[in-house]
Structure formats: structure tokens, C-alpha cells
Image (cartoon, rainbow, N blue to C red):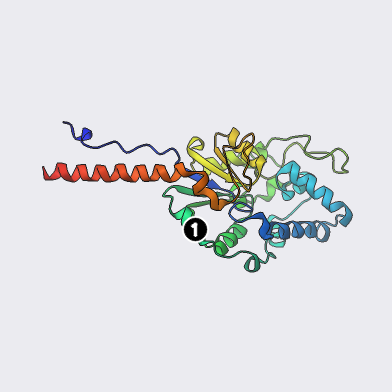
Amino acid sequence: MEYGQQYQQIPERKYECLLFDVDDTLYPLSCGLSRQTALNIRDYMVTKLGIEEEKVPELNAQLYNGYGTTMAGLLAIGYDLDYDDYHSYVHGRLPYDDILKPDPVLKYLLQSLPIRKVIFSNANKEHVDQVLGRLGLKECFDQVICFETLNPINKRNRIGEEDESNPSTILGTNTNFVNESSEHNTVPPKPLVACKPSEVSFELALKTAQINPKKTLFFDDSIRNLQIGKLMGLQTVWVGSSHRTKGVDHALKSIHNMKEALPDLWEAIEKTEDAHYTEQVAIQTSVRA
């Protein structure tokens, strides 16, 4: 009998990577952090950009719905923002300590899965660090893809000069992004930053983290992000909903429901461990013989 026939082959894993959004995914929408972020964005638009307060709610909603983030929309319609100043104003004033607490249950779930885990967030690195730190999850993730990853600061490109190496020059455009009734109804040829749900942001994230989309589970609370992720080949998990829809492979009411909703993740690990144990026994037996 050949050596390779003495033990069962270790099964190939279905998933090699778990890709996670941060806001309203690793913590619930109900905690209030995103609501406070939205208030800070509106305050920024009034205080820093001089937009009339009564126009801010509608414009903010249009830009968010059209471009993925309000910041991306503001840049697209002509506002010249300093990235760091914007993030400092919007995220730097958040009451993280009052809202977010350590989550040992989620930490246990993540650490019980010996699969590579990567963050994919539109937020800036400091915000991601603050959230992961408060939740006690920093050590659970192998890599972070965030705003700075997708948009290395380059002021030259922010004022319109083309550079094929910059994500800004290859972003697509949807001319229906901004409602025609808005005074800001002229959409420039190309958005100036890469962010979900643009396909370019996914391409950059997958390339940067060297992720095989067909062997990756993508967790996000945004159905738009999930549907684009699905188009990119990812298996998708809608966090915050118990109902599947187009572009969604799995749905979790809470991230804490991972094990109940995705038992095959843990079953695959157990099978792999059993096969590995059998292999080691066979090797030792062969050596003694």
C-alpha cells in the first residue's frame, strides 16, 4: 500500500477568507453610533461647507444613496474636502466609550474559526481602530482595508489631473445618482474617491488583500454593498436582516447568529481537524513501522 493511501485526504476548505464590514455589522445599528455619525456629517455640511441647514437632510440622503458615502458625493458635486479634516470632524468626535463595549461572544465566535479574516470598511483607519478596540476584536482580524487603503491621499488627483494608477481615474459613473430635483443635479464624469458599493472599490480590496472571491464570505449590513459583492463573485451574508433577497446568500439578524446560520463553517473546520488528526496518526504509525 502506498503511503498516501494510509489516511484520508484532508478536505479542501470551502472558504479561505471571511470579509467583514465594520459599522452596523460588527455592532448593531440600535446602539446609536451610526446615528451620531450621521448627525456629525450634517453638522459638518452646515458648519464647514456652509450649506443651508434646511437643505442638508435631503442632500445628505441623495449623496449617500447615490455615491455610497456622503463624503464621496460631496467631492463628486464639487466640494473640495480635506480627507483627514472630514474624518476627524465626523468620527473624531464620536462617544465611542459611551456606546461601544467589549463583545466577548463575537470575539469567541471569530477566534473559533481558524480562517483568515479581513476588514473591508469605507471608514478611515482611526475609526476602524477605535471600533475594533472598544469591541475587543483587534486581534481577531488579519488585515484592514479602509478608506486610506483605497484612497491614498494625492492632492494632485483631487483637482482633476489624470493618473491611471489612482483609483479616482477608473471609477464609473451612474448619472442617476443625484435626484434631478436637486440643485446639485450635475454629476461629474468620475467620482473622486473609491468606496463601497463601487465595483472598483471591491476590485482594489480583493487585489490588495489577495482574496479569492469565490472562496470568501462577505458580511455587510448594506444590501447595495452585498449585491455588488455578489457580482464580484463573493458569497454574501446580510447582517441585520433575517430575510434573504437578491444578491444575498445568507441572512443574520445579528452577527452573534453566525454559528446558527452558518453551521457549515464550523462543520468544515471540525472535518478538517479530524482528517488532520487521522493523517498525523497514520504518519506516526508509518514511521514506527
Pointer 1 local density, CA inside 10 Å: few below 14, some 14–19, many at least 20: some
Instruction: Report x, y in % for residue 145.
Output: 56, 49
Query: Where does label 1 land, which residue?
Result: 107
Q: Residue at x 73, y 50 (%)?
A: 71
- Above-or-below relation of 199 to 288: above
Q: Does residue 78 appear in this view?
A: no
Q: Choose between 142 and 268: the one closer to the eye.
A: 268
Instruction: Report x, y in % for residue 85.
Output: 71, 60
Q: In what quadrant of the picture does the C terminus appear?
A: top left
Tell me if 143 is positioned left or right of 37 in this view: left
Q: Choose between 114 and 186: the one closer to the eye.
A: 114
Q: Residue furthest left?
A: 289
Instruction: Report x, y in % for residue 181.
Output: 88, 40
- Above-or-below relation of 53 to 232: below
- Above-or-below relation of 47 to 66: below
For the residue marked with disc 1, what is the amino acid?
Lys
Q: Residue at x 59, y 35 (%)?
A: 230
Give the structural element (helix, strand or loop) at label 1: helix
Instruction: Report x, y in % for residue 77.
Output: 79, 44
Q: Residue at x 65, y 68 (%)?
A: 98
Q: Does residue 62 appear in this view?
A: yes
- Write down the quadrant of residue 246 in the picture: top right
Q: Residue at x 31, y 44 (%)?
A: 274
